Amino acid sequence: MLGLMAARQAGLDDPARLRQAERTRRVLSLELNKDRDVERIHGSGINTLDIEPVEGRYMLSGGSDGVIVLYDLENLSRKPSYTCKALFTVGRSHPDVHKFSVETVQWYPHDTGMFTSSSFDKTLKIWDTNTLQPADIFHFEGTVYSHHMSPVATKHCLIAGHRQEVLAVSWSPRHEYILATGSADGTVKLWDVRRASGCLSTLDQHNGEKSKASSEAANTAHNGRVNGLCYTNDGLHLLTIGTDERVRLWNSSTGENTLVNYGKVCNESRKGLKFAISCGCNPEFAFVPYGSTIAVYAVFTGELITVLRGHYSTVNCCVFQPHFQELYSGSKDCNILAWIPAPREPVPDDISEKSLPQQHLNPAYEDAWSSSDDEG
């Protein structure tokens, strides 16, 4: 890192490279922050979290009690120890509260004046943040397990919501008309919403080598329910998770299974599982709920980097704050925990980077920024 700073100071290196290295260092040092609490409002498990992408300041949560809470993550007190306060709550006494469990909350991608929520009460609601009143309510015949608004769409305001046994949906952050869906039948489908036929492809874990697979497993992404999926931030890859206790990484352009091995990943959830991927790091990392912990994987190698422990019960969701490389997680224990990068220890001026104890560096960080990268 000192070499990168020196090269940047001398004008020999791209400033983006230093930013990327520092983001990676911060993610690799995530720890449960004992000085930052998130006000406890929910009386039952927390299913979903979302941080608005405009300022990265406000966070929504939705719980099994049907309650929705909005938090301010900024430290207005300027004191080392503080609590992220709830600004408002759509509680049980609110006339428009969801009757049953809230499964997904999401900010409108371009403005904090609106957010959406969907629930087991078979509704999807569009909320006005300022008045806390629904601007519109959509009623469905079946249960709404998940919904998602495109982060990049400029020519449509479609919300992808699926009923019954489709457990996860995500718009591509690269192509505004491309949608990925995961189902209880083990399939993951890619859709182009402009096409009459809709479905572009069905992802196959065996990459078309049917002779090596049973007929039952052909054209499935997982040998179990697919209850979570997430695009990398550049939209080039799609990460999926299933109740077969496997995570798979797909090339989103070709639909090919990259065959990255993440090992066995505990996943007993009967509904959607919300996981997150870092942004601006090298390599990128996936934060996957794993029982009462959060497993951190290197996305493109499958290496288990670390396990974050702090919850007392099953973790249902986590969300990454890309501005400050922070992570927030929600659990059945009714708590939201903040995982914050450990502060950097000062290095004396007379200590060079080469003399630092390299064996203590995380292997993922060491591989991404080897000494050869700093040459030339």
Image (cartoon, grey):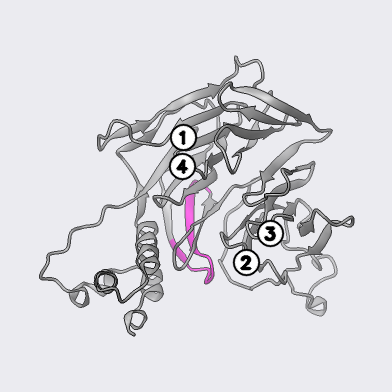
Taking the magenta stretch, the answer to whether it contains residue 303 is yes
Three-letter code for the amino acid on which mark 2 is drawn:
Leu
Tell me, yes or no, whether the two marked residues, 3 and 4, touch with CB atoms within 8 Å: no
Q: Quadrant of the C terminus?
A: bottom left
Q: What residue does disc 3 label?
A: 175
Task: Please report whichever mark, 4 or 2, sits nearer to the chain's N-terminal start.
Answer: 4
Marks 3/4: CA–CA distance: 23 Å
Tell me, yes or no, whether the two marked residues, 1 and 3, touch with CB atoms within 8 Å: no
Marks 4/1: CA–CA distance: 24 Å
Which region is colored magenta? 291-305
Task: Please report whichever mark, 2 or 3, sits nearer to the chain's N-terminal start.
Answer: 3
Q: What residue does disc 2 label?
A: 236
Marks 1/2: CA–CA distance: 33 Å
Residue 222, image x, y percentages: 71, 61
Among all residues in the image, which is located at the extreme left? Answer: 350
- Mark in front: 1 vs 3: 3
Q: Nearer the viewer, residue 323 or 229?
A: 323
Q: In the picture provided, is 263 more to the left or to the right than 164?
A: left
Three-letter code for the amino acid on which mark 4 is drawn:
Glu
Q: Nearer the viewer, residue 121 or 334?
A: 121
